[in-house]
Amino acid sequence: MIGLQAVDLLGVFVEPAVICLVAALVATVGLRRILNRIGINRFVHNRALFDLAILIAMTSLFILALRRSGR
């Protein structure tokens, strides 16, 4: 894993939290499609708030996974 230090990406230093956010955004889009097919959305009152909560949860899980990787 990349650890919690800034990563040099083509000459631009990017914080790992930004990389985790992008990865979480991709994972959230996939999870949202799966939940649409299952039909969970009929139980959700505010869809945008639910999507934001999933994005925040996925981002925090990715950051915690980076922390546990030990770098």
Image (cartoon, helix red, strand yellow):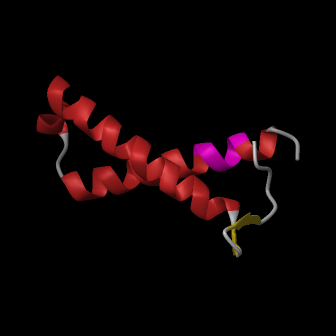
Q: Is residue 31 left or right of residue 40?
A: right
Magenta stretch encompasses residue 9: no
Near-viewer residue (7 or 16): 7
Say left or right for 55 vs 67: left
Measured as percent of width and height from the top left, residue 40 is found at: 19, 31
Asked if residue 49 is positioned above or below residue 12 in the image, the reply reads above
> Residue 39, located in which quarter of the rendered image?
top left
**Front residue (pair 68, 20):** 20
Closest to the observer, 26 or 31: 26
Q: Which residues are magenta?
A: 61-65
Predominant SS along the magenta part:
helix
Tell me where residue 1 appears, x and y as whole percent: 75, 41
11 or 26: nearer the viewer = 11
Residue 61 found in image quarter = top right
Furthest-front residue in this view: 10
**Residue at the location (88% across, 47% down)?**
71
For the point 34% across and 36% down, the residue is 31
